[in-house]
Image (cartoon, rainbow, N blue to C red):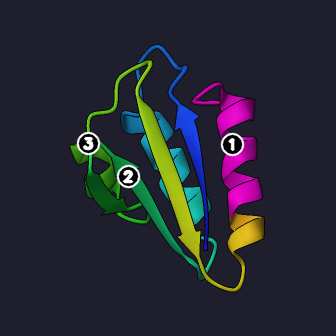
């Protein structure tokens, strides 16, 4: 299991488009991918779960990945966040 904390940098927060992109990347991997924000955990492969958190710009959250391809999954999620200016 690996985890990493991120801070939302995008002006719109982790809403519609960025959330959809995150779900699409996470869904390519067999590992369990969770997002923890303000003591709530959701499955990142669920768009409704991610959207329900309403994470605004400046919000800090943790991505937790557990499974055989966890390292590759985290690498791809980090690349998405950097490339799209979603979080760092």
The majority secondary structure of the magenta stretch comes to helix
Residue drawn at x 66%, y 30% as measured from the top left: 84
| Residue 43 numbered tag | none
Magenta span includes 85: yes
Q: Earlier in the sequence, mark 1 or mark 2?
A: 2
Could you tell whether 73 is left or right of 1 in the image? right
Visible residue check, residue 27: no
Vertical relation: 33 (above or below) 21: below
Q: Viewer-nearest of labels 3 and 2? A: 2
Q: Where 85 falls versus 41 (above or below)? A: above
- 3D distance between C-alphas at marks 1 and 2: 18 Å
Of the 4 image quadrants, the one containing the N terminus is bottom right
Q: Which residue is mark 3?
A: 53
Residue found farthest to the left? 52
Residue position marked by numbered label 2 in the rendering: 36
Residue corresponding to mark 1: 80
Callout 1 touching callout 2 (CB < 8 Å): no
Most foreground residue, 87 or 64: 64
Residue 77 horizontal/vertical position (percent): 66, 51
Instruction: Residue at 52%, 54% (x, y): give it.
Output: 63
Mark nearer the viewer, 1 or 3: 3
Residue at 44% x, 43% y: name it: 19
Q: Secondary structure at mark 3?
A: loop
Q: CA distance from mark 3 to mark 2?
A: 9 Å
Q: Quadrant of residue 61?
A: top left
Give the SS element for disc 1: helix
Q: Which residues are magenta?
A: 74-88
- Residue 75: within the magenta? yes
Q: Earlier in the sequence, mark 3 or mark 2?
A: 2
């Amino acid at each position: 299991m690996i985890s990493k904390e991120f801070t939302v940098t995008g002006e719109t927060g982790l809403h519609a488009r960025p959330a959809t992109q995150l779900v699409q990347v996470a869904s390519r991997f067999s590992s369990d991918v969770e997002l923890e924000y303000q003591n709530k955990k959701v499955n990142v492969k669920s768009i409704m779960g991610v959207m329900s958190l309403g994470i605004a710009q400046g919000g800090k959250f943790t991505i937790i990945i557990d499974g055989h391809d966890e390292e590759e999954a985290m690498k791809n999620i980090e690349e998405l966040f950097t490339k799209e200016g979603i979080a760092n």
